[in-house]
Amino acid sequence: MATLGIDGLVSGLDTTSLINSLMQLEAAPQAVLKQKSSTAQSLVSALQALNVKVASLAENAAAAAKATSWDAYRATSSSSAVTATTTAGAQAGSLSFSVDSVATARVAVSAQVRDDGSLVTGMPPAVTVRTADGRLVTVEPTSGSLADIADALNAAADAGVKVTVVRVTNGETPMYRLQFTGTTTGSAGNFKVFAGTAEEVAAGTAPRLDTTLVHAATDATVTLWKGVPGLERSFTQSSNTFSGLITGVDVTVAKVTEPDETVTVTVARDEAALKNLAKNLVSGLGVVLSEIASRTAVTSTTGADGTTSVTGGLFTGDTAVRSLQQRLVEAASYPVDGTSPSSVGIVLGRDGTFTFDEAAFSAALAADPAKVQAVVAGLAQRVADVATATSDKHEGTLTLRIQSQESLVKDLGDQIDSWDRRLELRRAALERTYATLETTLSRLTSQSTWLASQLASLPTWSTSK
């Protein structure tokens, strides 16, 4: 505990400055520890940042190594009436067909009524929907108001119908209709709405609510090879999306084609997607190698006296990082089955960086797609193996290196805390010592003053001859 002191009341010494100077010397070992701790913490942060980039590279490389990633195809349509998307198993090809109808949902409205509970009069009120497959779904509105009827039906997901309250007249007592719209298109979304319970519907005593048809449910129909005897074939379904019409392609129809019009859907290899596989791989390599290079760079500074000092980067001399750099360069630059990566656009420069030559990749892909896949996928697998072994969250070499540095930071922190306690005790001891010095000097001064006064009070004698 620090003691209260007043500088040099007796001695005239600046004891606070003396103690601070002495403490500065005493704290020199702790200052060294703090510098080591700061450097170690900076290295931990740098290694963690690098590990994140290596993990991202591992993901990109693993994606490029997968055979399924190279089954990239793109479907295009010759008309806005049809859209097409590829799924697993798509193959190059084309198909022409006509769109004879599109699927629509059934829409019907109730009779025109006031919102006075007269549409559904049962107590408690009940509304039942008969779905296309014959199921009866009954809901019980809170009251017979149109809003409560709509809320109850809209909340019943298995009813297959959505309800809207529509005002059709103005005035003090406006009139309304309920609009019923099927949630599923086509004949599979047909429905009937009754005012009453399921038992009343089955008995035939429940009146219909959807009394007026606005739009009947229609199915979607496409026809292949229309007008060709023996080949013409039509497909009809409730959904506007035809899956499997072409292997690995979903075709969605939006409008009917003209009588003499056909739509052609073409499936071709998606060169842009394949190019991105290789491009992302090279980009990921560049990010990791650039990070290593920037934190390994050595800087030189010239002092006022003309001397030059050289300072290494955080990664300078780090064997784990240097090993990672070497293994990545080897994995990405060595030939694959005797073929150089540069032949497919993955080029290693003299400065140790990788670049992606899109023109070379496109030319190689056009000439021999299988060879390009084999080279890029093989290279990517080697990179993925290195990156995964490095960044694995449990046993990765960088992960273990980070854990080691974190332990070092913790140990240094404990040593610094120990020095804090030691220095606190040392300062208290110095303050007590100088306080004792001032007390002793004060006591001696008091004694000196007393002796002087005593001597002054002694009688004086004079001798005469």
Image (spheres, rainbow, N blue to C red):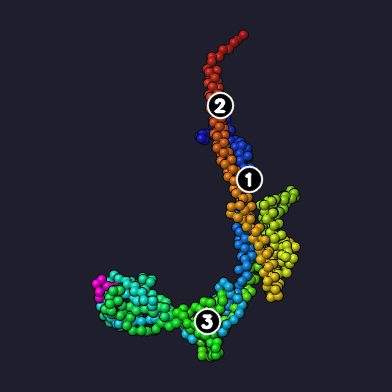
Q: Residues within 10 Å of mark 3 (few under 14, many from 20)?
A: many
Residue drawn where x is 57% and y is 32% of the image: 430
User: Most extreme residue toward the front, as rendered?
Assistant: 230
Mark 1 / mark 3, whichever is N-terminal: 1
Nearer to us: label 1 or label 2:
1
Q: Which residues are magenta?
A: 121-127
Residue drawn where x is 62% and y is 63% of the image: 62
Q: Which residue is mark 3?
A: 82
Q: Which residue is mark 1?
A: 36
**Image position, residue 50 (x, y; %):** 62, 56
Q: Which residue is mark 2?
A: 441
Q: Secondary structure at mark 1?
A: helix
Q: Is residue 171 above or below residue 435?
A: below
Residue drawn where x is 68% and y is 59% of the image: 328
Q: Secondary structure at mark 3?
A: strand
Q: Is residue 139 magenta?
A: no
